[in-house]
Amino acid sequence: MNGISIVSDTNPLIYLLNGSDKAAEYLNGKQIWISAISELELFGKKGLTKYEKQEIELLIESCFVAELSSGIKNIVKELLQTVNIKLPDAIVAATAMYLDLPLLTFDNDFIRIPDLKLFILEK
């Protein structure tokens, strides 16, 4: 994968936190952007230990977090009207589209979105 900056979906970050070499290989050396929704989704696992929470916070601190700007929200609205997609995925995709960066994911559902630069990893 060429380039310096990417938007990461939540799942590569979860795989990275769980020790995935494949996720680490693709994320290493990149300027990583994440959506505000991904920041929140990382805390979605019930019963996180204090250590796990600290690891998530360190990971988030190493990323650039794109907040929900009006530009991103406008793209989300359009995606929700034109593509069969869940709201969190629409926010992640819209973030990548707004920033004009490729999206790194393990999720094939993003294929449905035209004009989205996409790198799908295999598990």
Image: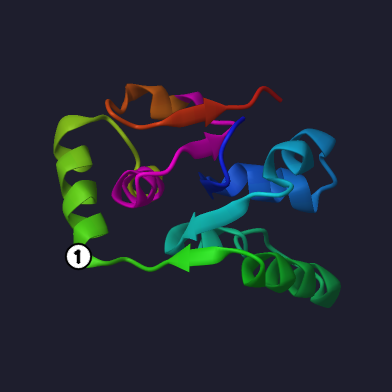
Seen from the viewer's position, the closer of residues 84 and 23 is 23
Q: In this view, which residue lies farthest toward the front?
A: 3
**Stretch in magenta:** 92-108
Residue 98: say if magenta: yes
Residue 47 in the image: state x and y as whole percent: 74, 67
Seen from the viewer's position, the closer of residues 95 and 84 is 95
Rendered residue at 58%/46% (across/down): 4
Reply above or below: 116 against 56.
above
Which image quarter is the C terminus in? top right
Which image quarter is the N terminus in? top right
Residue 106 in the image: state x and y as whole percent: 59, 31
The residue indicated by pointer 1 is 70
Residue 34 in the image: state x and y as whole percent: 51, 57
Rendered residue at 77%/53% (across/down): 17
Reply above or below: 49 against 86.
below
Residue 79: say if magenta: no
Kindly indicate the quadrant of the structure image that contains residue 61.
bottom right
Reply above or below: 94 against 54.
above
